[in-house]
Structures are given as C-alpha cells and as structure tokens.
Image (cartoon, rainbow, N blue to C red):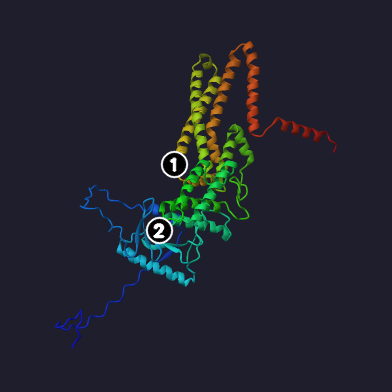
Amino acid sequence: MPVPNACNPVGAPTLPPPPPPPPAAPVHVITLVPIVPEKQVKRYDRDVIVKDVYAAFKVEKGSFDCSEELATVAGWEPLTHPEGALFFYHPKERVFTDADVRDHVTAAKLCEVVKEAHRKVNEANIPMPELVELVLERIMTDGVEKWGYYFADHDKRVVFWFEDHTSDPLMNKIRGVERKSHVRHALESQYWKHIELFPNKRSLPEDVVVKLKEIVMLAQAENITSETCLAPFASNEVDSMLGLVDSLMSSANKEREHSVWIAARFTRLFCNAKFVNFCGQPGARLGVDQSLYGKPNVHSKRILRVMNVFLFGSFDAQSKAVHRIWVDETMVQPRWKNFIDRLTTEWNGYTIYSTVMLAVDISFLAVQSVQTQMAATLLTYLSTLCVMGSLVVSLVLAGQVNDSRRRSAEEVASFMVGMSRSMLGLESLALMLSLPFSLLIWAMAFFAAALSVLIFRTAGVVVVSIASPIWFAIFCLAMWLMLAANDFHISHLRSWIIERVSQVTSPV
C-alpha cells in the first residue's frame, strides 16, 4: 500500500511513475572580457529610449509610497548616482552593475556571471583581499553577449583582472611606458574612476581628503609661481577646487556619496596627470613645455623662414603658440583656453581694421586722379582683395574657434593630431592662424604702394622732395621690425661683413 504524502494523499488512485526529466538545458556560455572603468563602462552612452507619449500619472490616495520599486531584487539593491544614473549593488557579493536586474533573465545571468568570475579567480590562484569589488558591464557585439569585468582593490587603490591584460584605453596613447611603478598611476586613476561611477554605500577616508588638499594647494602654488605649471587646471579653477576640498573635510569618514564623487573626480584627474607626465620616472616631465621624446621633426627651416618673411613674422609667433599648447601630442588644457581667448580677441580687432581698410580702398578708387593711374588702381585692387581675404578668413576662423571651445578635450586633441599629420605638420595650423594678420598687412602695403605711385607721379617737385625722406624713414622702420622678427639684425650683417673681409685679406 502506498505511503500517503502531500503529492499522493490517502484515497487517491495510484499513478504510474512520471517519465524521466528531460536533459537539463545547456548552461549559458559566459564570456568575460577585461575592461577599464573609463571609456569602457558605457554609462553615458546607454541611449535608453523613453516613451514619447504624454499621460498624466494617477497618484493613489494616501501617503505616497514607492518602496516596491526601490526594493531589493534577488539580493540586488537599486542605487541612484549623484548625477542621476540608476545602478545596482549586491552587498553580499560586493558587485556593482548598470544592467537592469529587475528583469529576471538578466538577474539569473548575472548570478552565473558572478560565479564564473570567482571561479576564474580561483583558477588563477589570485588572493582576494576582503575589500574587493567586482563590476560587470554587459557588452553586445554583433548580437553576441559578453560581460566586461574588473576588480577594484580598496587596499591598494588599483583595478585588476584575473588574466593578463593589454589595454589601449588604460595607456591613453602614452608612449614609452615601461615600468610597473609608472603604470600604477594609470591603474590608480582607473580606481578613482570606479569610485566616481559607484560612490554610494561607501565613506570618504580622511587621508584621501587630506592628500587631495595637499595636491590642490601645490597646484595653486605652482600656478602662482611658475609659468610652466603641470597642473591640468588654470589658476582660477584650482582656486575654486581648493574651496570645495576645504568643504570636504566635514564629510571625512562619513557615508556621503556626493562628497565621495567630488573627491574621486578630482583625485582621478590628478592621478592621470601623474601618469601622463611620467611622475616618479627617470624622464619625468617637470615643466609643461618639456618634451619627453625629443624635439619634433621640423620641416625645411629655409621654407619656413621664407614663409615667415612673407607673413610678416606672424607665422613664427603662431607656430610657437601652437607648440606651447600641444606638447608630445598632449593638449595643455589651461593654455588652450587662454590661446583661444587671445585668438578671438585678435580676430575681432582684425575684422574692425579690415572693415575700415575696405572703406578706405573703395574711397581711394573713387578719386578722379587715381582712375587715370593704372599702377595705382591695380595696387588698390590688390589691397582690396587682401582686405576681403583677411575679413573672410577672420570670420571663418572665429566661427570655428567658437565651435571648438564647446568641444571636449578629446575632440580638440583629435583635431590637433589630424593637423600634425598633414604635409606641414602643426605648421599648417600656424599658417592658417597667421593669415588674418598677414593679409591685412599686405593690404596696407599695397595701399601704401598705390598712394606712393599717386604721390610721385602726380605731385610737384616740392611735395615729392618733402614726402620722399618721410616715406623712406617709414619704410626703413617697417623693414627693421620685420627683419628683427625674423632674427635679422644689422649687427649680424656687420659681423658677417667683417668676417668675410678678414678671410679675403688674410694670407693663405
């Protein structure tokens, strides 16, 4: 007689034994790929579409309660980033993810992924400190699901993986990296990016705030006393940062995610600056103008000097300014902002001068005596064309610069890299930036030539005798300035003549 149980109560007919269960479905193939927090955790590129339909939300009676939506799901706690992003944290496993675990399928997959990650760690015989966090990022490539991962070690303040990893985003295009002590700055920068992405459920250590304050104070002191400060911020920005860091002291050793985010953001940027500048290495960059890879290849100096002469020295000035903001294919951000502000001010002035000069040329052409002088008319036409060129180039460049000021540092750096690979390298950018000034000077030179033709061909002997020495003096002064800008000096010419004469007269 069958024994009664919950499935087969007393009096129920005896059923034949059930058929054997079907074979278990194959476990999901889990592919774990190492990533770094910066650039590979795509939080800011989710592009989640919200329904574009308006409907007034009905608020139920009574005290408002949304605890069901904020409840823990399968051990995952929903958290809100200070910037507003939703992410999930598993306190028991110490795992963070941006994947929506409120979907049961996703939650089940994450459970398997976490187990697989820990299994891989055990296989690699990697000791896991207690304060280690795991971050998982879903990656879809051509319809194939992968899971990006990294571990964050709070004791050493670095990120790591259970496998050897070569990462371009980690290197950030920095050449010449050879030592572990150097790479550590990059790993620490990524650690602080992790804290920046997931600042909730953690306190702000007092030693972090104290060290950050020391770094910011040093940056401000360097900005005040040195023109080659390595800080990635301008003096006014560092001053604002110092005020914020002072306020962070009240949040030390307290669980305040906003303060944690602020400290993590600032610390990450300074750690990245240490990595870029080879801090602690034999070839450390000690000034923002210092190139670590030697002087860049300079194109034909003779061609550049000829160009500089025809551009009235503006090419050399712009070239030096461009090389001050682009050192070793790295953007000097504070100088870039000042450089753009200066260019905008200059071009605004050039447009005013060009407008006035255009009016002068048109009025000059209307003079009856000018119309009978073909040479004067031709020179005035050339002056008018140069003025129009200066005006158009100034407006176009001003529009492009105003647009570039709204770009991110990465976009500006990409633009500079593209320019450096052109035929003349960065000198092509210097050439473009020198056009408004040089065209305006050529316009004035052509107008001066046209006026001289008119004076010497139509005026009497008295006028010509008075105007000639003044015209010659002005010409000499202008040529002196232009030659001095190109490092041509009369003293050099005198020394060269004396040297040549001595070689000729000296006995063999």
Q: Looking at the image, is mark 1 or mark 2 earlier in the sequence?
A: 2
Local secondary structure at mark 1? loop
Pick the residue in front: 438 or 167. 167
160 relative to 490 in the view: left or right: left
- Which quadrant holds the N terminus? bottom left
Residue density around tag 2, few if under 14, some if 14–19, many if 20 or more, within 10 Å: few
Which percent across, then down, holds residue 351?
Answer: 49, 29
Pick the residue in front: 434 or 324. 324
107 relative to 403 in the view: left or right: left
Q: Is residue 5 above or below residue 44?
A: below
Q: Which residue is mark 1?
A: 406
The answer to whether residue 137 is seen in the rendering is: no
Q: Is residue 369 above or below residue 176?
A: above
Q: In the rendered structure, which amino acid carries the disc numbered 1? A: Arg
Marks 1/2 in contact by CB < 8 Å: the verdict is no
Residue occupying the point 39% across, 63% down: 146
In this view, the mark in front (1 or 2): 2
Q: Which residue is mark 2?
A: 201
Residue density around tag 1, few if under 14, some if 14–19, many if 20 or more, within 10 Å: few
In the rendered image, which quarter is residue 5 located in?
A: bottom left
